[in-house]
Structures are given as structure tokens and as C-alpha cells.
Image (cartoon, rainbow, N blue to C red):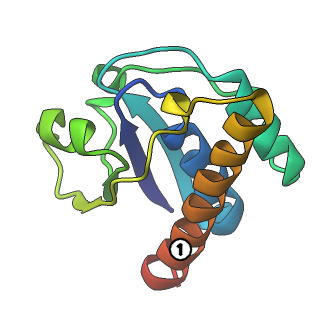
Amino acid sequence: MKNILVLCTGNSCRSQIAEGYLQYFAGEKAKVYSAGVETHGVNPRALQIMAEDHIDISGHTSNNVEEYVNIPFDFVITVCDNAKDRCPYFPTNAVKFHYNFPDPAKATGTEEEILEEFRRVRDMIKVYSQNFVNQHLG
């Protein structure tokens, strides 16, 4: 079983969504964790748009990356440039990947317009996650 860490700035949206999808697609092939270089709490809109796609992340918590320094990660995926720049060194041979997804928490407009941005980013992360699992976990 592989250990995967998904890193974002606040571990509230993008990394939570990625954790949900990566775990869903990987099944028993991996244990997926998510963390932030800060903790901002899980965004309620992230919970909502994942539930719309039948992925329950309501049990997720917002964690600081320092909580996981003793886990031997095989893969570390940063999902925003800020986390990539601030990503601490892990004393493992983890292979690092990076994709700078837009931050849906910065969306403005009506509630529906904001939710549409969350859905758009969710769908991008879903495709990335499925491709990652197919390419790296067989």
C-alpha cells in the first residue's frame, strides 16, 4: 500500500477534494492524507460539492503538514503554488508532483456562481486524481 500526501495552503478546499478523489480511485492501493502549510478548517462548500458527486468528505479534518513528518510517503502532491514553495522537506524518498489548481475559495459573485467555480475546480481535480491513480498505482 502506498502513502500519498496532498498539500495545499490551508487544507480547506483543493487538498480536501483531492484526498477524497484519490482515496476513492485508489481504494485499497493507497492511504491518502491531506494537509496544509496552515490550517483553515474544511470549507463547507467543498463538503457540499463533493457530496453532489457522491464522495463523502464530511469526516475530514484540516491538518497541518507537521503532523505527518513521520509517515513514509511514497508521493507528495502539491495542489497550489504557495504550498509547493513552502513544502517542508520530508525525510523520505517521496516522489513529488505539482499542479496549481485555481482556489475556489477566492471565487466571488452570487452563491450559485461561487458554487459553479467550486464544481469547476472539483471536476479538474477529479480528472487529475483519476489519471494519477491510473499512472502511478496501476
Question: Which residue occupies the foreground of this view, 51 or 88?
Answer: 51
Q: Is mark 1 on a helix, strand or loop?
A: helix
Q: Badge 1 is on which residue?
A: 133
Residue shown at 55% from the left, 50% from the top:
18
Does the rendering let one see residue 56? Answer: no
Q: Can residue 40 be seen in this view?
A: yes
Percent across and percent down for residue 23 are 64, 55
Q: Position of residue 131 (x, y in %)?
A: 53, 78
- Residue drawn at the location 55% of the way across and 66% of the way down: 129
Residue 4: image location, x then y, percent: 43, 53
Question: How many labels sit on residues?
Answer: 1
Left or right: 55, with 136 as reference point: right
Q: Nearer the viewer, residue 29 or 88?
A: 88
- Where residue 98 appears, as percent x and y from the top left, is 28, 59
Closest to the observer, 85 or 120: 120
Q: Residues within 10 Å of mark 1 (few under 14, many from 20)?
A: some
Quick check: 79 left or right of 25? left
The residue positioned farthest toward the front in the image shown: 109
**Looking at the picture, does residue 38 appear above or below residue 72?**
above
Q: Tell me what residue is drawn at x 42 percent, y 53 percent.
A: 101
The amino acid at mark 1 is Val
Task: Please determine whether, in this image, residue 75 is positioned above or below residue 69.
Answer: below
